[in-house]
Image: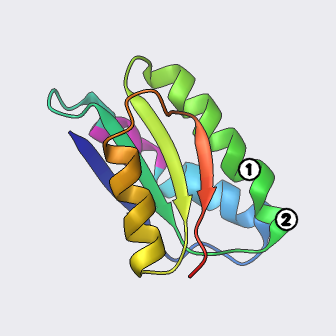
Amino acid sequence: MQRELVAEHLPENALDAAGAFMAFHLEAARAALGQADCTALAIILAPAGHDHADWRRTLARDLAREAAPKRVNVVAGAPGAARNDVLRFLADAPGVTGHYCVCHE
């Protein structure tokens, strides 16, 4: 079962946002992955500038490696059909892990 973790209220500055995620959301992500019924985790973030892409890709890749064989992906996008479609796809994609997916309406 894919669990979803929504990380809200991150700073606009990329470096500050990365630090805030690690300080306030990383343990929740690890706890979700530690649940027996969790086979995948989708971390949902708000849209952000291009300068956020590196830390978000690193988060997806490194947490997926740590959690293997469970899957981890990071999804960025505003609530709506595009984000829902990506989340639905990831829930049914057993080979997809460690990706940063940006959704556009």
Task: Return the residue at label 1.
Answer: 55
Q: Residue at x 79, y 60 (%)?
A: 15
Task: Return the residue at label 2.
Answer: 51
- With respect to residue 62, does 25 lie above or below? below
Under circle 2, the secondary element is helix
- Amino acid type at image mark 1: Trp
Magenta segment: 26-32
Q: Which sits in the foreground, 97 or 38?
A: 97
Q: Which quadrant, please, contains the N terminus?
A: top left
Residue 7 position in % (x across, y down): 46, 64
Under circle 1, the secondary element is helix
Q: Residue at x 40, y 17 (%)?
A: 69
Q: Residue at x 14, y 32 (%)?
A: 37
- With respect to residue 12, does 39 lie above or below? above
Residue 86 position in % (x across, y down): 45, 59
Q: Which sits in the foreground, 23 or 41?
A: 41
